[in-house]
Image: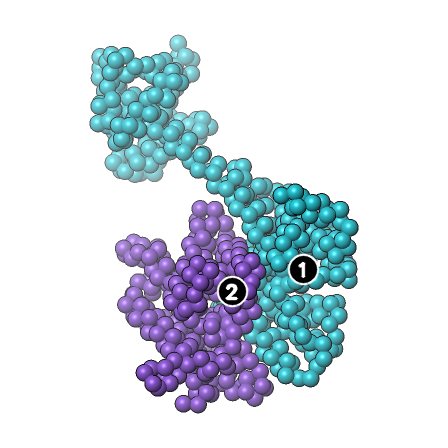
Chain colours: A purple, B cyan
Amino acid sequence: MSDATWIIATGALAGISCALVGTFLVLRRLSMLGDAISHSVLAGLVSGFLLTGSRSLPIMFIGAIAVGILTAFITNLLHERGKLQQDASIGITFTWLFALGVILISAFAGQVDLDQDCVLFGEIAFTPLDTVMFGNTDIGPRAFWTLLLVLSVNLLTIGAGYRQLKVCSFDPTLARSLGVKVTFWHYVLMTLVSLTTVAAFEAVGSILVVALLVVPANAAFLLTHRLGNMLAIASLIAVIASFSGYHLAVHFDASISAGMALSAGLLLALSLFVPRGLRS
Amino acid sequence: MTGMIQELANFWSLSDRNVLWVLLGAALLGLSNGIIGCFAFLQRKSLIGDALAHAALPGVVFMFYFTHSRDPWLLLAGAGLSCIVAHVCSEYLIRRTKIKEDSALAIILSLSFALGVFMLSMIQKLPIPNQAGLDKILFGQAAAMNSADVKLLAISSCILVLLTLLCFRSWRLLVFDPVYATSIGLPVRWLQGALSAALVLAVVIGLQLAGVVLVAALILTPAAAARYWTNKLGTMLILAGMFGALSGVFATQVSYLAPRMPTGPWMVMAVTAIFAVSLLFAPSRGLLIRALRRHRQQLRINEENVLRTMYKLLEQHRSPLPGLDSAQILSFRSMLPQQLELVLKRLKRRSEIVQDGALINFTSSGYQHARALTRRHRLWEAYLAERLGLAADHVHRDAEEIEHILGPDLEAALLDELEQSTSDPHGRSIPRSISKEHEHE
């Protein structure tokens, strides 16, 4: 496959993974928690690296996911125990963790091969350079296979917990009365968000992860009233955005990941104008 | 250690011009952002600072592209402009579509940033001189602040503080009761516009010091911390401003002592520490005092429950009993024996009961207390049964809770309602109040 195809495919995988978990974030009005987790991940990456001295993928994943869940946990704690508004709790938690990450990087500068720019930007154009070997054959970019794995985890988890996640998203009180473990599913979702964010941010940068989390899901939110449709439409929009975003970026000779986010934005703008009759 | 003190002394002698600029800049920024942030916090728009900070990028890049200049005033004007556009877009999404507030912020934040990155990556391939580190404006670098930057910061901070003083009363009304503000003819749209503009200014001047991610904290965290200490807006503004300024001073010192340390993140760490202290220790709203209050309340409820149980047990016997033992109390009141032990000890200490061997009995003050509690309990039961038509077996649980919080005025009101009733729905008599009894005599 050519580099272009690999990039589009990687972008599409990141997009679908984000769209699936993003749908639940949007429905639960936790869109900004995606933003928060994608920032506080920096602290997780750095401390994972400092604790083990290794930059291997599993360690980074574990560190980042742990901090992602920690973010959700502290946010919840401030909101429920501290009687603080939800959005203020989110803001305080992630800015603190991000600041901690930057300070750790400064303190151990030279030892950590990371900086805050890499968290904020990230570039999908480089993914074809880092490939995996299977036996003696080159089977394509590492990011592609990582994201494929993450997408499978997302699909399996959402498939297994579809009913529970659905009722928790729309009516937590009803969920509790039906005996659904609302807190458990909240943290399942948060784990998926952390996992997806970490996997995708290497490829596209954290701000663009936020775009992929919320933009396709909101476009789908405008177009349908059914959760199943919303998940499908959001994924479809993510794939289209990946394809058109690549060409947009090549045309203007600009950042491909930004191009993908912008295409998703254009699709959202378009869906604002879809007449009511066509919405399902 | 002495070296560090020496360094600190050097710092505070302020002989180093550069240190002075950074110190002033950080303190002023903390002050003005903390103050403006209070209004955003109270309007439940805490994360707007985060969104606006990201929205500044396309403006900065755009301005640079057209002017090829890195004049801070020009770039900040660009940043301000794109923040305003982003703000208008997010208001449109919130008001005119079914997209929710949090999603609108996240959409605007990520798409403006994407647009900024897109344009930045285009520009970087053009032969425009002087563009190295343009993106640095977004990550903040306090140490590089010079007198021109501080002048800009100082002027902006003064504008923000003056604007707040000027608009204090109308903004207060806008934040707490926008409907009333509209009804008395205040120009609500203009006031909201001015507030948003102030917020944009606060974000934009914060970018250079704290960077795009952390400026959100300078707006939000001081306000959240100040809220724990006070219910008055004026006090809250002063506190938030102080917290912001203090963390600015602290962070500048850290950067001075350890030059590798970035000022912006340390400012955020300091202000978050202030927040944590407020969250835990603030009088009346802090976690610690609330836990203590809950604990005391639980103790009091346990005591009152035991008193009332004793009253009920003693009342059941026609001939006066010499007293009760704890087993009897425990058979009516489900609590752990240790718990009962503790409660009895406290009641004895306050001489509401006396204990003779295993036998427990009221003192006269304890008897009166128990009688008053029973009276409230049964009045409430009678009220629920007679006036609200609840079945007799449904009223006990509710009364069980209300007896602890029913005040004398409510008790009097209940009494007026239930003039004829002398017994509760279970047929037990409602004890009359002690003072009434005295009137009889």
Type of residue at label 1? Ala
Give x and y (percent) for residue A182. Answer: 33, 56
Q: Is residue B426 above or below residue A32?
A: above
Please tell me which residue is depicted at 63% across the width and 71% down the height of the picture: B135
Residue in the image at 38% along x and 18% along y:
B349
Q: For this rendering, which residue is in front, B6 or B178?
A: B6
The quarter holding residue B387 reads top left
Say which quarter of the image contains residue A221: bottom left
* The one of B404 and A23 positioned closer to us in this rendering: A23
Q: Can residue B186 be seen in this view?
A: no
- Residue A92 visible, this angle: yes
In the picture of the structure, the residue carrying the numbered disc 2 is A112
Whole-percent x and y of residue B164? Answer: 70, 52
The answer to the question of whether label 2 and label 1 lie on touching residues, with beta carbons closer than 8 A, is no
Q: Where is residue A110 in the image (x, y as percent from the top left)?
A: 55, 65
For disc 1, the marked residue is B142
Q: In this view, does B400 lie to the left or right of B9?
A: left
Per the image, label 2 sits on a secondary structure element best described as loop
Q: Which of the 4 image quarters holds residue B208?
A: bottom right
Chain letter, disc 1 residue: B
> Could you tell me which quadrant the N terminus of chain B lies in?
top right
Task: Give the SS element for disc 1.
Answer: helix
